[in-house]
Image: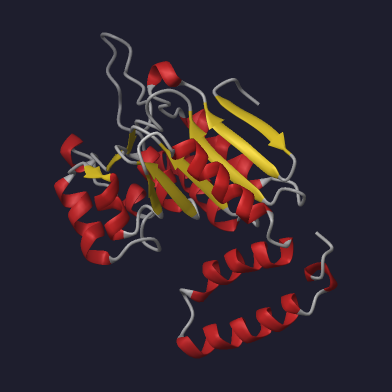
Amino acid sequence: MSAEIDVKQDGALLRVTLNRPNEGNRFTDAMAKELGEIIGTVSDATRVILLSGAGNDFCLGRAMMSPTAGATAAAPEALALRRQNEVIFNAYGAFRRSHAPVVAAVQGKALGFGCALTAVADITVADHDAQFAFPETAHGIMPTMAMSSMVDRVALKPLMYMFYSAEMLTAQEALGIGLVSKVAAGGSLHATVEGLVAKMLAIAPPALFGVKEFARAARTMDAQGANDFARNLHATINTSSEMRGKH
């Protein structure tokens, strides 16, 4: 593990902290690769993953590398660029596939890739003055990579507005479109998140993991398929001996 992402196993909770506060926790490609591997390889004993950022801001996006002074940077071939960007898509996929739900605690700004991480987290708790934006179009970047983090998280119209306008959203506005799960009152982000995590850890693991399994799959099913899946999952988990005090 690098010093740029701090990882601590706290019982059944995995605490993952973005640890470049002096850089606004901006991500290098190596960090994105590492984060995807961390989330994608958590142990079966991990029930909840808590993602947070050190310092004043959750994450100001990606750290874009500037070409050396005087050098002429040739545009990469499409295949090379696709391979380079796989670390981003792999990180999104790891969040979605993880058996353990991911809770993001957001203070300050969450921009670009930072905003995408708040989207792919299963639950996002924002400080009362947190801000969210995808500034890609304002920087001359076509943003479908970032958009892919949002397609199963928010409705189409706010998604389109957010990307076309590149406007900064307040925590309350992010809550209104479904990007954020809850806004913590001033000064209470830590207590709010820790209280939520404690409640989640008190849930029997089959039920905790089953909720995420259903939520992940049901949205792409037709109504009958979702009902059938719910019927099977409900019966399987609620009759398990692990639901009867064997946490």
Quarter residue 202 falls in: bottom right
**Residue plotted at (40% across, 63% down):** 152
- How many numbered marks does the figure carry? 0
**Residue plotted at (35% across, 37% down):** 186
Residue 25 horizontal/vertical position (percent): 43, 26
In the picture, which quadrant includes the C terminus?
bottom right
* Residue at the top extreme, as displayed: 69
**Residue plotted at (44% across, 29% down):** 27
Left or right position of 79 against 214:
left
When the figure is inspected, residue 32 is found, relative to residue 98, above or below; the finding is: above
Who is closer to the viewer here, 12 or 35? Answer: 12
Residue 204 horizontal/vertical position (percent): 73, 62
Residue 17 horizontal/vertical position (percent): 55, 31
Quarter residue 68 falls in: top left
> Can residue 242 be seen from the camera position used here?
yes
**Residue plotted at (32% across, 19% down):** 66
When the figure is inspected, residue 212 is found, relative to residue 63, above or below; the finding is: below
Colouring method of the image: secondary structure
In the picture, which quadrant includes the N terminus?
top right
> Can residue 34 be seen from the camera position used here?
no
Quarter residue 237 falls in: bottom right
Left or right position of 79 against 228:
left
